């Protein structure tokens, strides 16, 4: 079946999305036991009777886990439950040795919030939050005997339970309606904003590439102008911002193709494939899915006092949105210029460059100019360019000291990117330095005046704008290493036109 | 109080991956019905003033500090496993998933 184009899909259908994001907290220990959460340990070396579900063991809640959940809830403008419980989610799968996952069911710790996200055109879209609840991560399975580690065709599976029990916060949006063609962009912007928020709170590094933050994209289409939701698909564990956007986009096209052919969308989980941007069918969600949730009898309820909640609210750090507004004011940028900084991912590099001593406008100029261009050309993130903010700041300092002009500074930046070393090393090795020695410059100016008597005459006669030709000649003679403004002054002075 | 049906027992058996014969379904439906009936009698004595509870102790907010405690060694952890391989728990083929 040929895929309907994105534009055609949107011409007939209105997408509705639901996003579920799992965040692994950066606590030292697991949610219900004192096992370490350190990554990279030997298999099954960070497990104990509790997280292995051995008989007689009893879980006890991690106080920092609860505190982190409340802080996330508050930052998402949620109400915090006065009293809530954990629940057992029962299922038959070996990734939890207890045979259930301790989660929260109908009593989440945080609910009814929202997150305002900024889109690329600078407009704001409000994503409503249904709930944020506490649960635990599962163990890691590897499948042996089949092709490329898949379950299909495997003869048996191996389980490492180091990850089982690591605190997770699941954040669920309400249905996101009205985004239209911007639905994929909204999905990406939401996950990006949430990631920044989580990092600002310091509750997790939220590295998607390390699985510390993962997103499920639920999506359905309904004919334009109708209200009833269509059948949704659930694309699981999408693990980069770009993939979130691509997965939503592909599912919109796929749904439109299926619906357009008069067929029905099957409610199922789907897997996203990074290599070609498509999704494939996973597990069909039939009525066999029945988790038989019930309140966890081994844990007592969590009832955060209002005093504690208010204390946590008062101690929230500056949130990303507020911080961006402050920086925009500090840097004196228009909305459009600030948006350019945000779109380029340049906030942190600029801040670090300023911290290393560069003026704000200079720091912004380099990161949005040369470096953003290079990031674009190479398809890499701005922050990943092989130059440090300190190196950019050093180039700015050399310019400020008059040792480099703009043109030379550009060459130094390029050389640093090419791996030629620190800015000062490049300047020394390439012999790049502004010729500011007046006698050397004076000689060059005298020579150029001597070679261009007619131009010199015009300037003497008052045609000062003709000086550009002579400045150009001097710059050429000094291989760009002169300070153009200074050259101009010098020529005018010598010709008595200053 | 409607009794537990044969179909409900079959559903639970499927969720638990238990293979039950027809006569076992009948037998278990009957037995589970008795158990649930006995538990349900508690509701008869609990009046409106007794809220449902999930825990016998009137406690809330029992939490522990986020401090690492010693784990088992992987040898200890795997010592009770029916099968292990590459320092991991080995489980039979997983079916019905992909």
Image (cartoon, coloured by chain):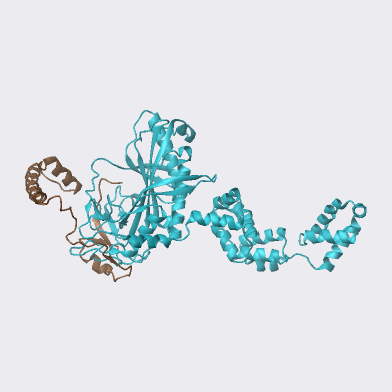
Chain colours: A cyan, B brown
Quadrant placement of the C terminus of chain A: bottom right
Front residue (pair B51, A260) = B51
Front residue (pair A425, A59) = A59
Q: Residue at position x 83%, y 64% from top? A: A441
Q: Which residue lies furthest to the front in this view?
A: B49
Q: Residue at position x 34%, y 32% from top? A: A264
Residue A103 locus on image (x, y percent):
28, 54
Q: Residue furthest bottom?
A: B70
Q: Residue at position x 28%, y 57% from top? A: A158
Visible in this render: residue A294?
yes
Residue B46 locus on image (x, y percent):
11, 52
Quadrant placement of the N terminus of chain A: top left
Residue A106 locus on image (x, y percent):
27, 49
Visible in this render: residue A25?
no
In screen coordinates, is A234 left or right of A123? left
Vertical comparison of A439 with B21: above or below: below
Vertical comparison of A335 with A10: above or below: below
Vertical comparison of A52 with A3: above or below: below
Residue A213 locus on image (x, y percent):
40, 55
Front residue (pair B96, A409) = A409
In screen coordinates, is B32 left or right of A151? left
Q: Residue at position x 6%, y 45% from top? A: B30
Total numbered circles: 0
């Amino acid at each position: 079946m040929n895929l309907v184009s994105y534009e055609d899909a949107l011409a007939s259908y209105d997408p509705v999305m639901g996003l579920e994001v799992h965040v692994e907290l950066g606590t030292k220990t697991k949610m219900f036991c004192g096992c370490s959460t350190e990554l990279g340990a030997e298999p099954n070396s960070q497990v104990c009777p509790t997280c292995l579900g051995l008989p007689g063991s009893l879980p006890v809640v991690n106080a920092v886990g609860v505190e982190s959940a409340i802080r996330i809830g508050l930052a998402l403008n949620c109400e915090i439950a006065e009293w809530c419980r954990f629940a057992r989610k029962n299922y038959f799968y070996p990734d939890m040795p207890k045979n259930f996952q301790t989660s929260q069911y109908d009593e989440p710790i945080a609910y009814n919030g929202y997150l305002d996200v900024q889109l690329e055109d600078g407009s704001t879209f409000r994503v409503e939050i249904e709930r944020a609840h506490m649960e635990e991560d599962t163990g890691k399975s590897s499948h042996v005997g089949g092709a490329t580690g898949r379950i299909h065709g495997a003869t048996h599976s191996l389980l490492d339970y180091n990850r089982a029990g690591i605190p997770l916060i699941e954040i669920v949006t309400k249905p996101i309606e009205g985004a239209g063609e911007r639905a994929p962009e909204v999905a990406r912007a939401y996950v990006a904003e949430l990631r920044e928020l989580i990092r600002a709170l310091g509750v997790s590094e939220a590295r998607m590439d390390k699985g510390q933050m993962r997103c499920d994209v639920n999506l359905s289409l309904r004919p334009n102008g109708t209200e009833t939701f269509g059948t949704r698909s659930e694309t699981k564990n999408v693990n980069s911002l770009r993939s979130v956007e691509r997965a939503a986009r592909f599912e919109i096209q796929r749904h439109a193709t299926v619906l357009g052919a008069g067929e029905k969308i099957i409610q199922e989980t789907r897997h996203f494939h990074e290599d070609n941007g498509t999704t494939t069918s996973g597990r069909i969600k039939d009525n066999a899915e029945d988790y038989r949730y019930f309140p966890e009898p081994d844990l007592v309820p969590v009832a955060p006092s209002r005093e504690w909640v208010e204390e946590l609210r008062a101690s929230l750090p500056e949130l990303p949105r507020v911080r961006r507004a402050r920086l925009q004011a500090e840097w004196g940028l228009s909305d459009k210029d600030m948006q350019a900084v945000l779109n380029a991912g340049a906030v942190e590099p600029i801040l670090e460059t300023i911290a290393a001593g560069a003026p704000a406008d200079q720091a912004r100029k380099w990161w949005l100019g040369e470096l953003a261009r290079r990031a674009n050309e190479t398809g890499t993130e701005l922050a990943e360019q092989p130059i440090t903010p300190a190196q950019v700041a050093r180039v700015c300092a050399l310019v400020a000291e008059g040792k480099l002009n703009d043109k030379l500074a550009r060459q130094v930046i390029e050389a640093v990117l090419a791996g030629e070393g620190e800015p000062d090393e490049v300047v020394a090795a390439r012999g790049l330095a502004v010729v500011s020695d007046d006698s050397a410059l004076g000689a060059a100016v005298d020579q150029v005046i001597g070679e261009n008597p007619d131009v010199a005459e015009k300037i003497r006669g008052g045609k000062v704008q003709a000086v550009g030709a002579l400045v150009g000649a001097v710059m050429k003679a000094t291989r760009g290493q002169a300070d153009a403004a200074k050259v101009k002054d010098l020529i005018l002075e010598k010709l008595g036109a200053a | 109080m409607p009794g537990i049906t044969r179909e409900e027992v079959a559903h639970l058996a499927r969720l638990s991956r238990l293979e039950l014969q027809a006569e076992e379904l009948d037998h278990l439906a009957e037995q589970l019905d008795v158990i649930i009936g006995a538990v349900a009698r508690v509701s008869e004595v609990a009046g409106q003033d007794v809220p449902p509870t999930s825990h016998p102790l009137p406690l809330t907010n029992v939490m522990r500090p986020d401090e690492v405690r010693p784990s088992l060694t992987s040898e200890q952890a795997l010592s009770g496993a029916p099968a292990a391989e590459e320092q991991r728990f080995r489980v039979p083929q997983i079916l019905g998933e992909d």
